[in-house]
Image: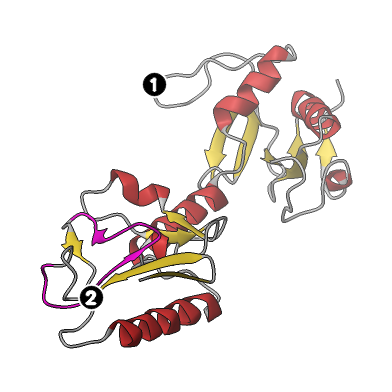
Amino acid sequence: MKTTHKGRTIEIRSPHSPHNRYGAPAYGINGVWKTEPTESPLLGRPGQSTAELLDELKRFIDQLDAEPNVRHTTYVWWYAPGRAEICPRSKNRVSAEHTKGVGAPCTDPGCRREAALEAQRRARRTGITAASLASVLTRAGYVNAEKHWDGVAKSAGFMASGEDRNRRVAVLWSKSLGPGRVCAELAEIADFLAGKGYRVEVTPAAGALWVFPKGSAGERPVWPAGRDGWAAEEK
């Protein structure tokens, strides 16, 4: 027999059919008669009638359609066209492919772990690193200080280093005026970066700048409000 139910084509071959050699009713959903990758036939129970199997298949389809999420362990062809797809993550795995909803997150435990790790990595990506900020400053004409093997500056210029998992970049000048003061060169850099849209703060000791990605939330008053409480050297 052949019929349709909620967008699925259901075919059933009775155990007495010349095309059925399994001793139980065989069925196909949307032309699929065997599961992958084992090639196991889709069968009802021994002694089950065609009508009983059809009723069981319809109830299972109704149950799938009533669920808000696609089951990762259920084959795509059980679902209405356009609702489910093979998860792209599973295509490169040694294990069998699994299912996800079209345009929806995958519910497979392995995929959920991978998605959580990717979300953590994205949260750590700030779009700002010491190298990228140094490139911005050098293109603007600021000199990147040469350093000794121990990181101490051996020539005049700025120094940039990533901090707190690259959430921010600390910018220093090769000369320091001590706590509470900042050199004119660093104040000029602060003006330049603030004008570019970066969030620029003065470190608590006022000996360096904290530079955050554009549009990010920081910890202290932004430049130039951060000038309050410390003195800049006049050129």
The answer to whether residue 31 shows anywhere in this view is yes
Q: Position of residue 34 (x, y in %)?
A: 23, 60
Q: Please provide percent x and percent y for residue 180.
A: 75, 44
Residue at 38 percent across and 49 percent down: it is: 89
Residue 190 lies, with reference to residue 28, above or below; the image says above
Q: Reading the chain from its start, which is encountered first: label 1 or label 2? A: 2
**How many badges with numbers are in the image?**
2
In the picture, the disc for residue 216 is none
Q: Does the magenta segment cover residue 4?
A: no
- Residue type pointed to by label 1: Trp
Taking the spot 47% from the left edge, 66% from the top edge, the residue there is 8
Other-residue count near label 2 (Cα within 10 Å), few / some / many at <14 / 14–19 / ≥20: many
Residue 174 is at least partly visible in this image: no
Q: What span is in magenta?
A: 21-37
Frontmost residue, 78 versus 188: 78
Q: SS of the residue at dot 1? A: loop
Q: Is residue 32 magenta?
A: yes
For the point 46% across and 26% down, the residue is: 151
Q: Check disc 1 and report the residue beneath it.
A: 149
Judge the density around disc 1: few (<14), some (14-19), many (≥20) Cα neighbours within 10 Å. few
